[in-house]
RNA sequence: GGAGAGGUGGCUGAGCGGCUGAAAGCGGCACCCUGCUAAGGUGUUAUACUGGUAACGGUAUCGAGGGUUCGAAUCCCUCCCUCUCCGCCA
């Protein structure tokens, strides 16, 4: 969420951001609503000031056992006017809020302006794309042949795009989670947290999933609770409403959680295999930092995510997402894409974003730079590190061998207890 | 699920219709004092919105939302959360 005053003072900039993002939000009402609000506010506050003053006088008169009946009658009328004006203000503020909470973040100056994902900028590539002297199989064939995944079982118990990992497949997932968490905790200095997988409405609002993206979330009507689409949601909101001190920053958290996404609007897309699931595992990193350091922290965060892919020796590339492809709350976002030999595609395994104060303002996460300094919003960042299913695709397809077996990346061998899946 | 207690500033914690944006303490800041120096004294110290170039005003905020009243932290209603006990269950 952007600051109301910022929107007012930088209206052209906000409009430009909305346009560059290909966002459909209509800003045309904003200026008049904002002016209307302040007009009403001036009126009602004058009346309230009068009421406060006269109420004092009434108290004084009563104390002196005088007759305050005339003033009380007068104020009764003022009270009615205040009620009417307050109602008008409520309506105007409601309309304003609808707009304000749906305005996306302003892209950072280094975010390329573009009109589609084709305009994303490849920042770097790492690792060598292997060449096979046999025909590479897609991961679903490899997984089925080796008994790592029960696709039908997942569909039977929940529906399409739900899968069940079985046997060494399940252990591979667990090995990856342990490997990633250990790496972030021991090498990168993060604190592990294990948050709730279900959150309330306020929490979903805090990170920007609501109000715009409700249809993408699983929801329990009975309790008005949501299944998390990413650990970012509970972990970022862990500090919602907090006043931190400058010395506490930066705070680094890492968490494993399952992620639940309805993928509304993506029906029929990537239906085969592990490419797009309603439920998947992910290890996430979340940072709370001093605004002055957030762009350095963003680059460090990217490196922490890259470390996972490098350790797994998977070829990948880093994309700087353009304005049309970047997430609602992000000012800048790198996507990490792993190359998958079997399906011959780059697959997104991580998004590494800087939200600046956008989420902190929604979730009210502040800090004081000095002991008696004014409160400021922290900057929040997060990155997958990494999403499991597509990482597993990368491993299965890139490490497959002519006989159908799959070599285990060196760093996973100790977690998995073997160097080959066959 | 049943019974009770409670939610107040950066923190602890009073207040229970007007003199309370809010006592006291802690913490912070400024200055002063001091041959008891991790001591003492004095002052100061919330946030948001809004008006104003500013100085400085106004309004709101005591879990959230309604209500009663000239006036609500204080009374009433609804909801949320926390704690204790009981029940149930991993």
Image (spheres, helix red, strand yellow):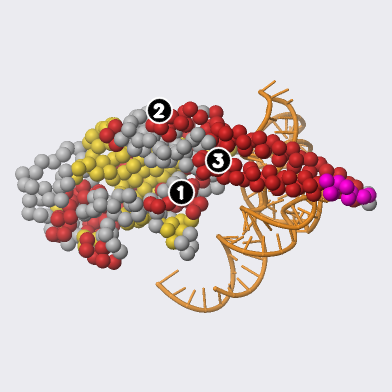
Q: Which mark is residue A210?
A: 1
Residue at point 10%, 54% (across, down): A404
Residue A56 visible in the shown view: no
- The range drawn in magenta is A66-74
Residue at point 24%, 65% (across, down): A153
Residue at point 14%, 53% (across, down): A406
Q: Earlier in the sequence, mark 2 or mark 1?
A: 2
Whole-angstrom CA distance, mark 3 to mark 2, is 27 Å
Whole-angstrom CA distance, mark 2 to mark 1, is 26 Å
Identify the residue position indicated by label 2 in the image.
A109
- Element carrying mark 2: loop
Identify the residue position indicated by label 3 in the image.
A96
Please report, as a chain letter, where disc 3 is located. A
Q: Main secondary structure of the magenta part?
A: helix
The quadrant holding residue A349 is: top left
Residue furthest out toward the right? A65
Q: Earlier in the sequence, mark 3 or mark 2?
A: 3
Residue A94 visible in the shown view: yes
- Element carrying mark 3: helix
Task: Tell us which disc is closer to us: 1 or 3.
Answer: 3
Task: Tell us which disc is closer to us: 3 or 2.
Answer: 3
Q: Which mark is residue A51?
A: none
Q: Position of residue A103 (x, y in %)?
A: 47, 38
């Amino acid at each position: 969420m952007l600051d109301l005053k910022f929107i007012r003072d930088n209206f052209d900039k906000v409009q430009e951001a909305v346009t560059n993002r290909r966002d459909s939000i209509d800003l045309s009402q904003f200026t008049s609503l904002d002016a209307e609000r302040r007009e009403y506010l001036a009126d009602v506050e004058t009346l309230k000031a009068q009421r406060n003053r006269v109420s004092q006088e009434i108290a004084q008169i009563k104390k002196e056992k005088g007759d305050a009946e005339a003033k009380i009658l007068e104020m009764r009328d003022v009270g009615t006017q205040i009620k009417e004006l307050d109602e008008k203000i409520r309506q105007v503020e409601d309309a304003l809020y609808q707009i304000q909470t749906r305005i996306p973040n302003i892209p950072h100056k280094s975010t390329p302006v573009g009109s589609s994902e084709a305009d994303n900028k490849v920042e770097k590539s790492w690792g060598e794309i292997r060449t096979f002297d046999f025909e590479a199989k897609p991961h679903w064939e490899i997984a089925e042949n080796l008994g790592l995944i029960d696709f039908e079982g997942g569909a039977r118990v929940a529906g399409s795009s739900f899968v069940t990992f079985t046997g060494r497949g399940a252990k591979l997932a667990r090995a990856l989670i342990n490997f990633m968490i250990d790496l972030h905790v021991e090498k990168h200095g993060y604190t592990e947290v294990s948050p709730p997988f279900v959150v309330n409405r306020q929490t979903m609002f805090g990170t920007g999933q609501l109000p715009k993206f409700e249809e993408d979330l699983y929801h329990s009507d009975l309790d008005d609770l949501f299944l998390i689409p990413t650990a970012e949601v509970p972990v970022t909101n862990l500090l919602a409403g907090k006043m931190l001190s400058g010395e506490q920053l930066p705070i680094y958290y890492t968490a494993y959680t399952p992620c639940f996404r309805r993928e509304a609007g993506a029906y029929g897309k990537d239906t085969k295999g592990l490419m797009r699931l309603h439920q998947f595992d992910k290890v996430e990193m979340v940072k709370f930092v001093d605004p002055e350091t957030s762009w350095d922290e963003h680059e460090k965060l990217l490196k922490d995510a890259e470390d996972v892919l490098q350790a797994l020796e998977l070829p990948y590339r880093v994309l700087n997402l353009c304005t049309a492809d970047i997430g609602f709350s992000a000012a800048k976002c790198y996507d990490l894409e792993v190359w998958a030999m079997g399906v011959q595609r780059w697959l997104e395994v991580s998004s590494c974003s800087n939200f600046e104060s956008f989420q902190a303002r929604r979730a009210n996460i502040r800090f004081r730079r000095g002991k008696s300094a004014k409160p400021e919003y922290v900057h929040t960042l997060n990155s997958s590190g990494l999403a499991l299913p597509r990482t597993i695709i990368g491993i299965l397809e890139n490490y497959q061998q002519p006989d159908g077996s799959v070599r285990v990346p060196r760093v996973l061998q100790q977690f998995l207890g073997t160097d080959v899946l066959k």
